[in-house]
Amino acid sequence: MTATSESRSPSVDPTLEEVVETIDRHGNERTSLMHVLRDIQERHRCVSPGAQSLVAEVMGIPRVEVEGFVSFYSFLSEEPWGDIVIRVCDDVPDRMRGFERVLSAFREAVGVEVGRTSADGITLTTTASIGLSDQAPAALVNDVPVTELSTDKVHRIVEALRSHRDPKKLVTLLGDGNNAHPLVRSMVKNNLMHPGPLIFSPVSRGQAIRRATRVSPAEVIRQVKAARLRGRGGAGFPTGMKWEFTRASLGERKFVICNADEGEPGTFKDRVILTERPDRVFSGMTVAGYAIGAQEGIVYLRAEYQYLRAYLEAVLAQRRSDGLLGRDIVGRPGFHFDIRIQMGAGAYVCGEETALIRSCEGRAGEPLNRPPFPAEHGFLGCPTSVNNVETYCCIAKILEEGAAAFNEYGTPESAGTKVLSISGDCLKPGIYEVAFGITLHTMLEMCGAEDARAVQVGGPSGSLVGPTDFHRRICFNDLPTGGSMIVFGPDRDLLSVVYAFAEFFADESCGYCTPCRVGTQLILRYLERLRAGRAEASDIEELRRTARTMKTTSRCGLGSTACNPVLTSMERFPELYAPVDDHPDAYRRSFDLPRAVAEAERLSGRTSRGEHVEQGYHA
Amino acid sequence: MPDTFTFLMDGRSVVATAGQSILEAAEAGGIYVPRLCHKPGLVPWGACRICTVRMNDRPCAACTQPAVPGSVVENDTEELRAYRRTLVEMLFVEGNHFCMLCEKSGNCELQALAYRLGVTAPRAPYFFQARDIDASHPDIILDRNRCIQCARCIRTSKDLDGKNVFGFLGRGTAKRIGVNARVRLRDTEVDLTDLSLDACPVGALLRKREGFRVPVGDRLYDLEPIGSDIERNSP
Ligand SMILES: Cc1cc2nc3c(=O)[nH]c(=O)nc-3n(C[C@H](O)[C@H](O)[C@H](O)COP(=O)(O)O)c2cc1C
Ligand code: SF4
Ligand code: FES
């Protein structure tokens, strides 16, 4: 990294007074660690080794744990970044829409390679999904999303940054709806193509809470069960049952957590819900607090959605002054509940509920062993219920209009609607709230993609399906999805899609357990051989064996689904996995001789001679 | 749940006490469940996944899964042995394990497990990752080439030594053991009496100048396969 000009930014090391002041502001508790370190990162462009020592000392945390924390999250760094950090999203929908060109343009305009910082303090890097797949290619400039990038736009952006150095000033045309709110002021669009009857219907503020508090908590849970609500975050666990467990668990303190980590590549529905219906989400959380007997709510907001934070804080403040949060809510004595926002820092695994809880506790986001479940032993050891953003909206709606009205939509096992985030090769990417049970065909018609070759249902952790499955239904017991739907047109190279997903999982594995940590890397290596036309039948067999081992033995859902792109594409598109023929002389085709001797050639400073080296054994 | 109960493992009845893990109960009954990150006396960790069994058909880690009354557990089946072989191979290709040059050879749990499971040459490609060695301490060496991320040193230091000498840094395959100092092990609060120094199943954390006290050939797993001590307790 190149040093940035000292005049512009403060030194990389904070002073002790500054560290003490930062910690005091957030409270000297382990749970504040994320916000303390994010502040230091923002001000000093890194959390330097010196800063780590100071934080460890003042907070009484072992230094190695502070270092472990900083090195776990991709939005924190030990090395100084520039005062402007450009993160170009390299997710599959972005790759389908010109990510490579856009990245080259950034390299050229900034004048550095990926992972480097320019002399005038602009860092260029890539990042996983940032929740803008419908307006790809996209990037984050510090906290500011820039969307629908072209090479021209990239040059204009970098030029503008060089002149004013203020990412906020990049926003000239505001997006629709609350994206134009003074506290958001973003170019992001909602692309709300098909607002459905439940989630995006108008909100009557406070109604859900008033209805809930008129009956007993047990009755609220009964209504949620009667609505047959299942979690919208992906796993589809019955919400009423989760609440019942949490309510039944003993504990002075209980917590309601809203999972707004939305990290699954291709999903962006929680972003639009938080932009347009935050009141409904907070209502749902408050109802949850009442039902399970919790007084504290936490929204775990992914770092990529920092640009929504001030606005969400304002909505919370408004609710406090309206008596919808705080003490004696809606005038009901003894019903206290408040919500705070906890930021993430760039780690997909933190969407997994136990990793999310660890992250809130000021630790690296490694999932926990279960049992015990969060309902018994969650945040700070207290009974905790974690639900998805959309799930809380469903709750509010159920309380607003009753279980029967909710049940009108969907199928018997999958009641209600589902908000889909559709991206990729379709005419109308965006948000579609549809009743559970519609077929993929119908969905593809709606979004203008009748010629699709394949759909990635539920993002990379879901499954890749082809036309023979397009008659199947979007619902929990047929094709479940947390919302991500990536469409691939007739000419797409599916193997490169599988490879891109494999890269994603290899980057995002927490590294705790063997099958996921090593398996995600092995998958990459086998797929590289396959893409280079060097995979032998035994390599394909090894690939399958690796994937199955991950599926069965991984510790959490990341590892056990990281193999899905490979396993589902093997099943539905076996032609992608054709091995090369055995070499008549029994040479191993997977062995790449020129590559194997490249390092030795470089070191010795001369090239190897001979036809077999130049062409490889397999020629 | 009753205080003691039984479950069935590979057709044998195993007695367990409430809260006991499948692995511990099996071990008490003389059945060896292969493991690497588990060490008696430490909080179960569930990281290596070698101990994966099927309880009522559902896969789980025997070291962290509490035994369930009346459950049916599969342990020594071909399916599970195959997963275990793959996991052991994964650890071999991820790190840089040169048994013939390693002073832990014969006392190494990873090597011994490979022998017991019949892993010969890994089929997967080696990663050949560059990993740091910390030889700063006059009497201790930390060779990350051989580390399998089992966290036994971390847990022992924390829970038994009452210190925090070790911790994980990074994530994914870049995950590595860090020390509680800005740079080196010698700057930590480590002592030669620390139990953490004897917690490593492989040759990553060693006391210097002790490796060859017992000659190769006479070492623990040169004499009998890993797990034999447990199986001797079989009723
Ligand atoms: C690797 C991984 C990532 C996850 N990411 C998310 C996420 O971003 N948002 C979410 O709501 N659930 C996510 N989940 C599911 C959560 O663990 C949890 O099941 C969910 O938040 C529960 O809420 P629900 O019942 O309302 O769906 C993830 C799970 C795994 C294994
Ligand atoms: S499967 Fe294992 S390595 Fe992967 S994220 Fe979960 S615990 Fe971490
Ligand atoms: S011994 Fe159970 S996971 Fe390692």
Image: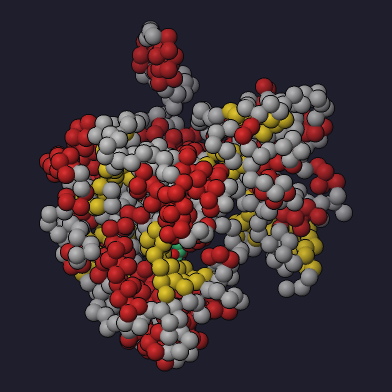
Query: Coloured how?
Result: secondary structure
Q: Give me the residue at 38% from left, 52% from top.
A: A39
Left or right of residue B3: residue A499: left
Of the 4 image quadrants, the one containing the N terminus of chain A is top left
Total count of labels: 0
Left or right of residue B24: residue A430: left
The residue sitting at the bottom extreme is: A214
Q: Position of residue A230 (x, y in %)?
A: 43, 73
Name the residue nearer the viewer: A347 or B137: B137
Of the 4 image quadrants, the one containing the C terminus of chain A is top left
Q: Position of residue A185 (x, y in %)?
A: 19, 60
Q: Position of residue B159 (x, y in %)?
A: 69, 51
Left or right of residue B85: residue B221: right
Residue A538 vertical placement versus A34 (above, below)? above
Q: Quadrant of residue A442?
A: bottom left
Name the residue nearer the viewer: A90 or B7: A90
Q: Give me the residue at 45% from left, 24% from top.
A: A591
Q: Give me the residue at 72% from left, 64% from top.
A: B19
Say if residue A264 shows up in the picture.
no
The residue sitting at the right extreme is: B235
Name the residue nearer the viewer: A26 or A301: A26
The residue sitting at the front extreme is: A17
Name the residue nearer the viewer: B132 or B194: B194
Left or right of residue A4: residue B129: right
Q: Position of residue B118 (x, y in %)?
A: 68, 36
Say if residue A176 shows up in the picture.
yes
Q: Give me the residue at 43% from left, 17% from top.
A: A599
